[in-house]
Image (spheres, coloured by chain):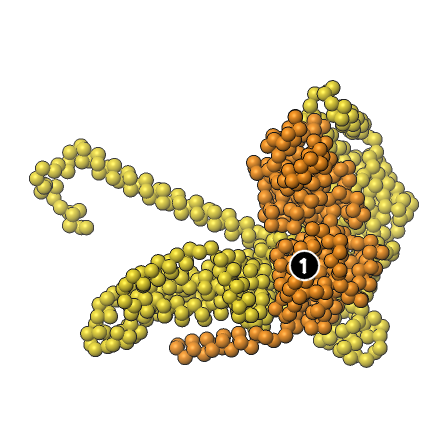
Chain colours: A orange, B yellow
Amino acid sequence: MTSFRSTALLAVALLSSTGLAAARDQIRIVGSSTVYPFTTVVAEQLGKTAGVKTPVVESTGTGGGMKLFCDGVGVQFPDGTNASRRMKAGEFETCQKNGVKEIVELMVGYDGLTLAFSKKNPPMALTRAQVFLALAKNVPGPDGKLIPNPNKTWNQIDPSLPNRPIEVLGPPPTSGTRDSLHELVLEAGADQIPALKALKASDRKAFDAAWKSIREDGVYVEAGENDNVIVQKLESNPNAIGIFGYSFLEENVSKVQGVKLDGIEPNEESISTLKYPASRELFVYLKKAHVGVVPGLDKFAQEYVSNRAAADGGYLEKKGLVPVPKAKLAESQANVASLKAMTGEGLPK
Amino acid sequence: MTDTALAPPMTRSAGVDFDSTEARELLKRRYRAEARFKALGLLAVLVTAAFLAFLLVDILRKGIPSFFEHRATLTVNFDAALIDPKGTRDPADLREGDYQALVRAALQSQFPEAQDRRTRRALDGMISSGAVDDLRQAVLANPGLIGQSRVMPLLFSSDADLFLRQRDTLITRRTGSGPLRVEGESNAVTLRGGGAAFRAALAESKTFLAERRRALLAELATLPAAGSNAGVDTKRTELEQAAASIQARIADANAPETLTDREPSLLVAIGDGILKITEIGANEAKATTLIAPKPGSIITEWSLLTLRVPETNRRVNDNVSAWLEILAQRGLTERAFNARFFQNGDSREPELAGIRGALIGSALTLMVTLLLCVPIGVAAAIYLEEFAPKNRFTDLLEVNINNLAAVPSIVFGLLGLAVFLNAFDLPRSAPLVGGLVLALLVLPTIIIASRAALKAVPPSIKEAALGVGASHQQAVFHHVLPLAMPGIMTGTIIGMAHALGETAPLLMIGMVAFIVDIPGAITEAATVLPVQIFLWSDLPELAFQSRTAGAIIVLLGFLLVMNAAAVILRRMFERRW
């Protein structure tokens, strides 16, 4: 017994010491859970066809992924990160400071933030201002001053909306989808309301606080990162509206329908032309310094923007990614071919 | 017990009357209290059992289908021109062959009318990309297949698989009455039936209209009173007009109805072909051809198929539904055990995804945990229980160990990230690091359980050993420890079961990841069963829901095997005195 134990311990010690400084032969990608379903498809395809190990894709969230990605260059750091928004200027600086100088940016497709509800109810259209009035913590009262959101039913916001209680299931603050909800829907919605537009001119800080806060009185329910749970709840509760990515709407057409936002229905066409107001671009960032060190990284980038993956009718579209237009895809392909590093100009704050 | 029962009633203690009414009342009350407690206890057990049974039945109901798959058994012609154009029979060349074309050709031979690009793509989409890999494997294993025709099982894609699973609930069949005259062809077929052949179907489509009208009226009822707001008034008029036009269509029972993709689909099966009705009247229907039937103008045997879910709401359109229906009719589909589920690693195609990678990952991780925490935990417990002096320091240690057992598991993950990954530079996502973190997590549990087991050994055993001259260490290792072993093992198994179900600490060290390759060593990237369950539950594809339940069944099975092993080991070590 004792001899067995000591050999086992020795084996563990040996194995752990051998794996330490060895070079890595497997690509590692971290980042957004929204891009995860697409990056994993590309990873699997690469593993099947390119003769390299299938890349490991972690789902850490956009912010968490950026942090890991920008920690440094070397085999112990990930080779790429998924992001459901563009890299921020601050994150780019952190990267530069930690020696991650050359970053290749791939715009891989679009996702639409969709508001969806049960098929049992007739179709519904909302403006972003109405969504703001339904979800914001504070809304302008009759005198234009901000008061705690009093709206409990949709027809309190606008009499032409149905007399149903407002119940919204949406992403928690850790999610990239939540960032998009604030930036794409609530900020623009606040801008459509005259009283708040006036506030924006006079007190920018108060205006920002208004669209950055969501009510906490039980009307907006944080449903966790699992979007399937939201779909299930929408099925059982016809009053509820759920907020999630377009791929979940497409996959669950038999159960839920999308809300028209500012008069535009969420579909592939309206999202890829960015006509649908709540559509966003999805990105993958890669380290140029790792190309040639980690086998297959260049092939991974080529596969991601290849015609058979990312173009119209490609396999990513079948998985619910809204493809980029031809011209833009050609630009991405050129960037990948020359491994053009981003300059950091024009990044959002 | 028997003594008191037989005690004669005459001998009574002085001053206490056991026969008085109060005493009898008291006795009855005590019996009632006991009966009440028993009933409550039984109820508690039943409620727990009901919850457990519900959970199990639900998981089994959802999960068992994932252990089976649907395949098309089609004749595949292994055309040398497609898979070995150079004619070398060299494995490297064979690997490059166009096996997708073989699948396409096999499908085309069944449905030659699928000609335009869109339709052919839909036809290809019925079969999984896994079937292409299967054909490649078959040819590589047996190059003699080239040039031959064989019946091969081709795996359906997950959408087709789901359709075949639900076929009987999705489709209602009605045998057509009377002869049917077929005129025209391809996209403009007119079906004429004598004696109101389509009356029942027409009436049915009118009932769907009634449903739509009810929904409109319900929405109308939620609008506020007229005249309050211009926007409301326009909306009210719109809704009223829509409801009125639907009402008119319902009222005229013989008026033909146009069927769109928002209504249930009506298909006419004529022998080996299927037509889709676009406009239906009582005696006459317009249709388009999905699968061409054998030519003939007057048909006596036909049936009407209704797909209750409208086409826009389905993952498979009418065309694919018709192909699948005909394949099933021709006996070219089969349901078989899904061995892939136990052989493959993760995949983004639900029909190809398997649990093997996670299963091996869990086994490797638990092995590291077990090898680390049993020796350390038992040694710590023996020292603390048998050798350590009782002073304030050891008291403090004990309190801390007990506290550690209640620390949230994510904290151990953070610790693992800081120590094992950042300070020691161990690889991310490796079972080694996962095992180390989980060992930290379950160590307190094992120490506490082992100490309790050591304490439960009667002191007389140790004293006897010391009495015949054994040293303290000999007494502990030769006599106390073997007797405490069953208890220590129970504690270890509880700890291991705890470790098996953890996901939170593994998030920080990168084991919550998409990993396809099956790990072969504790330093290779791997994930574990509960993480796999979590990841699958979050994917958009519907078919992953049954995979999730299937993975849960595998996890429960793993747990069962572990517990069974513990019971057997305990039996071996158990000693009675």
Q: Name the residue tied to disc 1.
A: A93
Compared to residue B436, the image places residue B12 above or below, namely above
Q: Residue at coordinates 79% horizontally, 79% vertically from top-left?
A: B89
The x and y percentages for residue B197 are 81, 37
Tell me if I can see residue B222 in this picture.
Answer: yes
Taking depth in this image into account, of A244 and B257 the one nearest to the observer is A244
Q: Residue at coordinates 40% horizontally, 62% vertically from top-left?
A: B444
Residue B419 horizontal side relative to residue B569, left or right: right
State which quadrant residue B471 falls in.
bottom left
Taking depth in this image into account, of B122 and A335 the one nearest to the observer is A335
User: For the image shown, how many numbered marks are present on the structure?
Assistant: 1
Taking depth in this image into account, of B388 and A246 the one nearest to the observer is B388
The x and y percentages for residue A319 are 72, 55
Spot the residue most to the top: B227
Taking depth in this image into account, of B406 and B204 the one nearest to the observer is B406
The x and y percentages for residue A300 are 73, 66
Tell me if I can see residue B348 in this picture.
Answer: no
Quadrant showing the C terminus of chain B: bottom left
Q: Amino acid at mark 1?
A: Glu
Judging from the image, what secondary structure is the residue with disc 1 in? helix
Q: Residue at coordinates 58% horizontally, 66% vertically from top-left?
A: B428
Q: Residues within 10 Å of mark 1 (few under 14, many from 20)?
A: some
Compared to residue A334, the image places residue A233 above or below, namely above
